[in-house]
Image (cartoon, grey):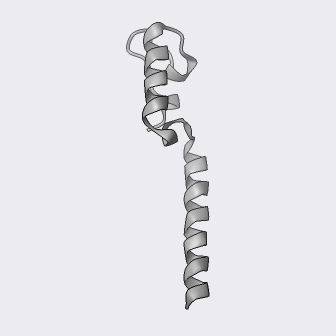
Amino acid sequence: MTYDRLVCANCASPVNEGRCPVCRANRERMQQENFFAGMNPMALIALLTVLIAAVALLAHQTA
């Protein structure tokens, strides 16, 4: 899950804005836990498409 869609229970603002100490702490924790947490969904789809194309190219060359 990307943290840009989360809403803070403490201040009711988006977590990615980091308005309160709770938001900032959770944003930092999520960024450290997962590399893909900071990426938007379109970037993940593009990365997946490139990986699938690379595997398909390798499979085609070895056949």
**Total marks in image:** 0
- The residue sitting at 54% across, 15% down in the picture is 18
Residue at 55% x, 45% y is 41
Q: Which residue is at the far bottom?
A: 63
**Rendering quarter of residue 58:** bottom right
Residue found at x 57% / y 77%: 56
23 relative position to 52: left or right = left
- Residue at 39% across, 10% down: 10
**Residue 25 sits in quarter:** top left
21 on left or right of 45: left
Q: Position of residue 4 (x, y in %)?
A: 53, 30
In this view, 12 is above or below 40 = above
The correct choice, above or below, for 38 with respect to 21 in the image is: below
For the C terminus, the image quarter is bottom right
Q: Quadrant of the N terminus?
A: top left
Along the line of sight, the residue nearer the viewer: 34 or 4:
34
x%, y% of residue 19? 54, 10
* 51 to 14, vertically: above or below: below
Residue in front for this viewpoint, 36 or 10: 36
